Amino acid sequence: MIYQVEGLSKSYGAYKVLDQVCLEVFPRSSVAIMGPSGSGKSTLLHCLGGVDRADQGSLLFEGNNLQQMGEEAIASLRRERIASIFQFFYLLPTLTVSENIAFPLMMQDHTAAERNERVQEMMQAVAMDHRAQAYPNQLSGGEQQRVAIARALIMRPSVVLADEPTGNLDRKNGESILELMQQLITRQSSTLILVTHSKEAAAVCRSLWFMEDGQLHS
Ligand SMILES: Nc1ncnc2c1ncn2[C@@H]1O[C@H](COP(=O)(O)OP(=O)(O)OP(=O)(O)O)[C@@H](O)[C@H]1O
Ligand SMILES: [Mg+2]
């Protein structure tokens, strides 16, 4: 099981952002989460990714209870098992395309040759090998998101958490980015959890869940 979540709740003051969320996510599955603005989708993804903590409930990721783990142990899971893709790409502006993609591998134990081979392979997979030496500000939005996808997948994570990855792209680019993301995630036998406002985007996933007032409905 990738995730097993029970009774996950989180409040800001009297405001309940997550209200008894329960979910199960199986390996190699893909789930889209839709719902109104402010319903708690990003907060849930932050909890699933270990960057935020809920106040109550249990959250198991591959059997590890993220609610009770220390920061160091969570950081290590985030380096190796959990990847994130965002609406605003968040590439490192002073690093080139190939350096951005290589970045997650720098904290792992690879030889330079292995690292270069994996970076080359990922750049080809997202069709950015011809721009290896370019900097993020020299790329279009769609190109930046392809680099961000390569960076997310290079460590072969067990889960990819994507928060409106096409929210900042036009429709045509958004469609091709989603198709690429889905194809690479399937090829790597990873699991996808996709938050989106778009029905078309949600359709690339096998299951669809709805978030409303902090409650998750399948
Ligand atoms: N740090 C915070 N302090 C107080 N309130 C917060 C904080 N973070 C989020 N919230 C509130 O929690 C609610 C849920 O936010 P969240 O970002 O999870 O919504 P969302 O479903 O992702 O919305 P959107 O579709 O607009 O991205 C919102 O009302 C938001 O204002
Ligand atoms: Mg959000």
Image (spheres, grey):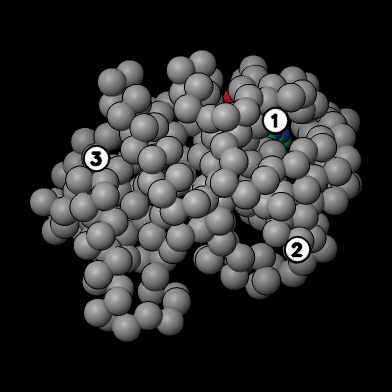
Nearer-N-terminus badge (2/3): 2
When asked about the image quadrant of residue 92, the answer is bottom left
What is the CA distance from the residue labelled 2 to the residue labelled 1? 23 Å
User: Is mark 2 in CB contact (under 8 Å) with mark 1?
Assistant: no
Residue 17 sits above or below residue 212 on the image = below
Task: Tell me how far mark 1 sits from mark 3, CA to CA.
Answer: 29 Å
Locate residue 6, reporting x and y percent. Answer: 86, 43
- Label 1: which residue? 40
25 or 215, nearer to the observer: 25
Count neighbours of disc 3 (C-alpha within 10 A) and say few if under 14, some if 14 to 19, many if 20 or more: many
Q: Secondary structure at mark 1?
A: loop
Residue that carries the numbered disc 2 in the rendered image: 64
What's the residue at 45%, 77% (across, down)? 108
Residue 94 visible from this viewpoint: no
Residue 101 in the figure: left or right of residue 193:
left
Ligand 1 under 8 Å from disc 1 Cβ:
yes
Instruction: Give, as a three-letter code, the residue at label 3.
Output: Glu
